[in-house]
Amino acid sequence: MSWQTYVDDHLLCDIEGNRLTATATAIIGHDNIVWAQSETFPVTLTRLLYVRRMSTRWIRSMHKIVVQNSFTCLIGLDQFKLRFRSFSIDSTYKEMPRKLKKSERKPWVTSVNELKRKARLQRQAKQEASEITLRPPENGLLVKALVPFACEVYAARAKLLSCASMVLKSAIVYSCRLCGEVHVGNPPHKIRTCNVRGSPATKEHVWEIGGMEHVLPVVESFHLYDRIGRAVSHDERLEVDRIPAIVELCIQAGLDIPEYPTRRRTFPVYNVAGRMIDFEKRFPKHDSPGEDINAHGFWEKRNQSSEIKSMHLLGDDVQGFATQGMEAWEKMLFGSSKIMQKYGVQTCGYCSEVQVGPKGHRVRNCQAFKHQMRDGQHAWQEATMDDLIPPVHVWHVRDMLDGGLLVNGLKRYYGKLPAVVELFAQAGSKVGENYASMMREDVAVPGPDEEKLVV
């Protein structure tokens, strides 16, 4: 028996001894999908109704109708409950990551028990005078299968920056002066989520014009000449270049940039009793550590640097730039995730500091929660993709032609997207299916006079 048949023959029928007679009925799932409805059911309520709470009287009346119409005899009460239980668990909305407090540490990628187990095995290996087999890239050699990914990620990043700069010429980005929240599009939203020290009592944002640094923030890392060598010390913090972390990841994965030379080994290193043994010379003949290295010039602006050189894109097709930028964004994320499966990236558990390599640096510049107890040292842990490439989630504007104003009273119906994806989406690019659960396009946004009808 179908749901429509159940609505027509059972929910709308007159039952002897029962004074409850429904004039219009519908069966709606927790994801706002209508399973079945009568012809007299209002269309507005069909789009907006989202069943969250039902009164005790309605539950008892529905149970009585089901029992009297022998519905439990046809399909079984257990199957009826199981069907609704499994449907309510399946949610299409993806929750945004919760904003951590200053005293909270970032979630661990690897559990603490697993880290303790690995440390225990390493201590046992140090006590035994035996060789530990290392594989690339732990032994200093490159993973040859990831070298093409490094080149693709670097090229995709350059193309992404060029396309985003072209689209920003015809779009407006706002940034809150107090909390740093970002909004793409005009006018800025009216959602009151500014809850920091110094914010107004109404929690309204204080908007100002933003730029590329708000859409695609740059996370920097120290450039390592030898990725398995010693870490950067605190006294060397002004002598080592700081470059974008994703560029450093591509360099360590096999990308060669003349301005940032790195050591490429031809023979692996060995681990004997917990000590790294390198049989190569410290500086092989084909390496020239004294040339093309500006040890004290990381703050100087490099002219025509290959790292910041933008691609020359001709034409005024904003939608074309947005489409190319979206493809470059997806390619950069996919390639970076592939590289991070082999090449380690470390991040501080309390601040946004990132170091590409198997271990973190020793520079004491952490100013996060209780940094005095650590003497300014970072609490290093394994990094995720969001640490390397911050997504900067913004509120999604569905229809710019309709005004695009987001109000505070309807914020539970709005979705979110990464700022660069929202920028390209408003320029006419197609958004991938992996963002469908974040956009919430399947949820109908009611009008100001219809919101009160939503249960």
Image (cartoon, rainbow, N blue to C red):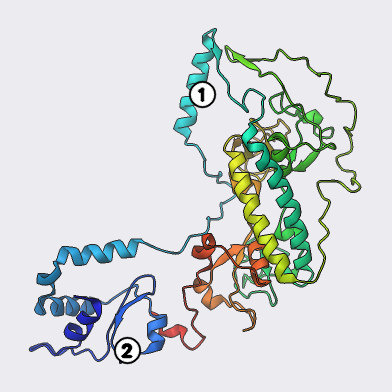
Quadrant assignment for the N terminus = bottom left
Can you say whether 225 is above or below 122 in the image?
below
Query: Nearer the observer, disc 1 or disc 2?
Result: 2
* Residue 128 visible in rendering: yes
* Residue 300 x %, y %: 90, 44
User: Counting residues from the N terminus, which is met first, the one under dot 1 or under dot 2?
Assistant: 2
Q: Which residue is drawn at 89% across and 34% down?
A: 294
Q: Is residue 178 left or right of residue 20?
A: right
- Label 2 belongs to which residue? 41
- Label 1 belongs to which residue? 119
Give the spatial CA distance, label 1 vs label 2. Answer: 64 Å
Q: Residue at x 67, y 65 (%)?
A: 323
Crowding near the residue tagged with mark 1, few <14, some 14–19, many ≥20 C-alpha atoms within 10 Å: few
Q: Which amino acid does label 2 sit on?
A: Phe
Crowding near the residue tagged with mark 2, few <14, some 14–19, many ≥20 C-alpha atoms within 10 Å: few
Along the viewing direction, whichever of 418 and 231 lies nearer the viewer:
418
Q: In this view, does 369 lie to the left or right of 60?
A: right
* Residue 179 visible in rendering: no
Can you say whether 5 is above or below 369 in the image?
below
Secondary-structure class at tag 1: helix
Secondary-structure class at tag 2: loop
Q: Which residue is drawn at 82% across and 55% down?
A: 310
* Residue 149 x %, y %: 65, 42
* Residue 436 x %, y %: 51, 65
Along the viewing direction, whichever of 254 and 275 lies nearer the viewer:
254
Which quadrant of the structure image shows residue 452? bottom left
Q: What residue type is labelled 1?
A: Ala
